[in-house]
Amino acid sequence: MGSPVVLGIESSCDETGAGLVRDGRLLGHAVASSMDEHARFGGVVPEIAARAHVHSFVPVVREALERAGLRMSDIGAVAVTTGPGLSGALQVGLAGAKTLAFSLGVPLHGVHHLAGHVAADTLEHGPLPDPCMVLIVSGGHTSLLLVRDLARDPIVHLGDTIDDAAGECFDKVARVFGLPYPGGPAIDRTAREGDPRAVAFPRPLTGTRDSRYDFSFSGLKTSAARWAERYRLRGGELPVADGAASLQEAVADVLTHKAVAACREHGVGTLVVVGGVAANSRVRALAEERCSAAGIVLRVPPLKLCTDNGAMIAAVGDLLVRAGAKPAPLDVSIDPSAPLEYAALHPVSRTGARAA
Ligand code: KG4
Ligand code: ZN
């Protein structure tokens, strides 16, 4: 008997995702996004996101099953993001996943969202080497991690952002530049027309006395905002493309510089870059350039698996199932601010905690 088909559910932010994975292979997935509904507010509105998940949950699961050519009864385990993320959004996904697992009589696994981003790459490039260096760059997180066996071992944080995440920096500066939401893809598009050397934005925490693997992007954000403000005060038209290209260059430079240094120092031969910002064209190109110069193998998931999706959660579920991990109790809860320690995340519910 082979391993079971794992259904993965993702609902931590504005994407409702469902994916089906077995034995490390993606069978089918579907994503619905409420991004357009948030655009006029310039950022994700938690209540709107939660309501959109209620709306999309069943259609997205059905679509993923259709694409995989499977039926509900083929699902052998369910994995769901239990944190971190928006509380209401996470609760919709967890409630749906519990209902499916309970009614199908199959095990449920709680998954850390960021471990999902890491596992996304395995669907395209196969199992991760042990050890590997992982750079996670998303809207809410920026971390450099030393990963061994994702399903079994603790995840070692070499560095994290001490303030804003890289994606957050793109999103906030894009707003100041008058670009549409979400800011990251807009900066990426606009930067194509600009000169990355036009503005000398700072490279935070890259000095010799700075923390080697921590990140900081709030100073860079402020510096970009000041640059825009100076132009506007002079009444001139903002050279947005130059600003976008220069900002993108600064972010890509810092991220790849630290990631390659971490690989070298720890003798790790593979760098995996994941999360929404791994979709950035300059981050990808500079990582490729610097890794190949340093003899490091670079792995980056395909674009559609970089941003939030259910396939990546199913990928973690599949690894957990095959590693014989203990499923979550059915009173498992969510943890909106869960630190990344293990890929499995099973916060106890309030009633569970009281009973314990
Ligand atoms: O991983 P993700 O989909 O959601 C979180 O878990 O946060 O990442 C979303 C972030 C946003 O900040 C978005 O602006 C950024 O990823 N992003 C990009 C690009 N595509 C998405 N940033 C720069 N360039 C892109 N092409
Ligand atoms: Zn994410």
Image (cartoon, rainbow, N blue to C red):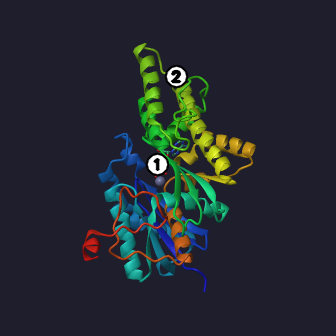
Q: Amino acid at mark 2?
A: Pro
The residue carrying pointer 1 sits among few (fewer than 14), some (14 to 19) or many (20 or more) residues within 10 Å by Cα, namely some
Q: Earlier in the sequence, mark 2 or mark 1?
A: 1
* Residue where numbered disc 2 is placed: 239
State yes or no: Cβ of the residue under disc 1 lies below 8 Å from any atom of ligand 1. yes
* Residue 274 % position (x, y): 56, 52
Q: Residue at x 47, y 27 (%)?
A: 224
The residue carrying pointer 2 sits among few (fewer than 14), some (14 to 19) or many (20 or more) residues within 10 Å by Cα, namely some
* Residue where numbered disc 1 is placed: 141
Name the secondary structure under disc 1.
loop
**Residue 224, which numbered label?**
none
Q: Residue at x 44, y 79 (%)?
A: 107
Q: Is residue 55 left or right of residue 290?
A: left
Q: Amino acid at mark 1?
A: His
State yes or no: Cβ of the residue under disc 2 lies below 8 Å from any atom of ligand 1. no
Q: Is residue 178 visible?
A: no
The front one of 74 and 229 is 229
**Of circles 2 and 1, which is in front?**
1
* Residue 165 % position (x, y): 46, 43
The front one of 84 and 229 is 84
Looking at the image, the residue that sits furthest to the top is: 234
* Residue 321 % position (x, y): 53, 76
Report the number of discs.
2
Q: Is residue 287 left or right of residue 247?
A: right
Say which quadrant the N terminus sits in. Answer: bottom right
